[in-house]
């Protein structure tokens, strides 16, 4: 442990903590763009510069180890001028499309430009990155909004372990690229979208979010991912009852703020037009039970001149009581004829633990078989 003084306040920091970590833990805000608490320090944005007693020049707080007796200043006229200049340069290479940007209201660069009173850059506008890539179904890469913070590169390497992207070229012409500029589908990218999660601007955005509303028009709800048994925490942004995008929640117990492909991009089924909301029974079985007055057609054409059969052609919608009675009757007939081990059940990770517990109790207690599995185990 080390005790240092930040803005006149004594702050105790654990071993190996940076000055930025110590300040944030004490509730002292320091501007930052390239820093992320789950990633290694990079010190590239220069917004987190602080003054340290005994040192002539300001130093990045994210890469400065907190030491006993250190005296640090995070706010001064000199630091404000330096941070304004950094933001001024960033805005000279960044389109000010805030009025139509999907990230408006949740953009770190916009927030700091507002905080430091920058309407536009005082330098001549010169865009070094204009590439727009939509080579996958999950997220777009709009390089004109990139500020080269390398968060995406570091999360892909340090958290995901895919190492699918890297910094290409040097200086003003540098940009985030795949190896040999290959399409993402030809790289080791898993399309987990964690690069989208940590991006501070609109350089990376989910495809499903584009044009779906501004940040202040969305409702955010925390819930548990319905897929595997890990129990990741999700932040689901919705508008008018429809999912706009999904993100992780910083500090979540199971996953932190990082998600897999399914958790981030797989919730569109919740409001999908083809989602089944009531039970369906095969039309021939429904006719045999007297649920429909007419038998199914003898043959459903698959000629190119005829449409392929849909669900309504082969099945009929019934109420829950009818469906459950039918399932119970069919299961009882199989058990009576072939024994309980002729029946097997597979639970769903989309169901709750309580539902799956009752399901396995039914299989073992009512039917009398241990043939039970769960897709989350696969």
Image (cartoon, rainbow, N blue to C red):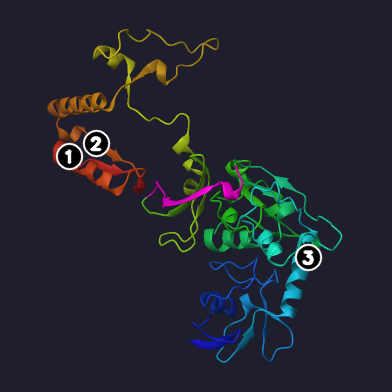
Q: Which residues are magenta?
A: 213-228
Of 291 and 310, nearer the camera is: 291
Q: Residue at x 75, y 53 (%)?
A: 96
Mark 1 secondary-structure assignment = loop
Q: Who comes first in sequence, dot 1 or dot 3? A: 3
| Marks 1, 3: nearer the viewer | 3
Q: Residue 281 location in percent, x, y?
A: 31, 21
For the residue pair 23 and 262, the one nearer the viewer reads as 23
- Residue that badge 2 annotates: 344
Labels 3, 2: front one: 3
Q: Quadrant of residue 278?
A: top left
Residue 333 vertical placement versus 303 (above, below): below
- Other-residue count near label 1 (Cα within 10 Å), few / some / many at <14 / 14–19 / ≥20: many
For this rendering, which residue is in front, 56 or 314? 56
Which class describes the residues within 10 Å of circle 2: few (<14), some (14-19), or many (20+)? few
Q: Is residue 214 magenta?
A: yes
Provide the residue designation for mark 1. 369
Q: Are marks 2 and 1 in contact (CB under 8 Å)?
A: yes
Task: Tell me the CA gap for discs 2 and 1.
Answer: 7 Å
* Residue 88 tag number: 3
Residue 270 falls left or right of residue 326: right
């Amino acid at each position: 442990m080390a005790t240092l003084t930040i803005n006149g306040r004594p702050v105790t920091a654990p071993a190996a903590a940076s000055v930025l970590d110590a300040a944030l833990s004490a509730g002292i805000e320091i501007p930052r763009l390239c820093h992320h608490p789950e990633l290694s320090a990079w010190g590239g944005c220069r917004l987190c510069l602080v003054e340290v007693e005994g040192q002539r020049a300001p130093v990045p707080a994210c890469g400065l180890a907190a030491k006993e007796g250190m005296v640090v200043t995070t706010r001064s006229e000199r630091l404000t001028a330096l941070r304004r200049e950094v933001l001024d340069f960033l805005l000279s290479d960044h389109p000010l499309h805030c009025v139509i940007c999907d990230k408006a209201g949740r953009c770190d660069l916009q927030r700091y430009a507002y905080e430091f009173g920058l309407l536009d850059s005082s330098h001549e506008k010169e865009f070094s990155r204009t590439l727009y890539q939509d080579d996958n179904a999950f997220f777009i890469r709009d390089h004109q909004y990139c500020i080269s913070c390398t968060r995406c590169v570091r999360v892909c390497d340090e958290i995901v372990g895919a190492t699918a992207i890297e910094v290409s070229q040097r200086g003003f012409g540098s940009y985030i690229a795949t190896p040999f500029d290959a399409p993402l589908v030809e790289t080791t990218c898993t399309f987990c979208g964690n690069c989208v999660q940590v991006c501070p601007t609109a350089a990376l955005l989910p495809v499903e979010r584009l044009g779906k509303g501004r940040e202040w028009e969305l409702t955010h709800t925390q819930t548990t991912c319905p897929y595997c048994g890990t129990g990741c925490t999700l932040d689901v942004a919705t508008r008018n009852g429809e999912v706009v995008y999904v993100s992780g929640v910083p500090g979540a117990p199971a996953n932190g703020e990082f998600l897999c492909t399914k958790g981030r991009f797989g919730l569109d089924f919740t409001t999908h037009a083809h989602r089944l909301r009531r039970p369906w029974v095969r039309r021939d079985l429904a006719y045999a039970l007297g649920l429909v007055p007419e038998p199914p057609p003898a043959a459903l054409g698959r000629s190119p001149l005829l449409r392929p059969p849909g669900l309504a052609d082969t099945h009929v919608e019934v109420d829950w009581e009818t469906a459950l009675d039918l399932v119970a009757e069919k299961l009882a007939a199989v058990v009576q004829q072939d024994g309980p081990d002729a029946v097997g059940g597979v639970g769903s990770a989309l169901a709750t633990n309580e539902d799956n517990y009752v399901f396995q109790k039914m299989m073992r207690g009512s039917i009398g078989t241990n043939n039970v599995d769960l897709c989350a185990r696969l």
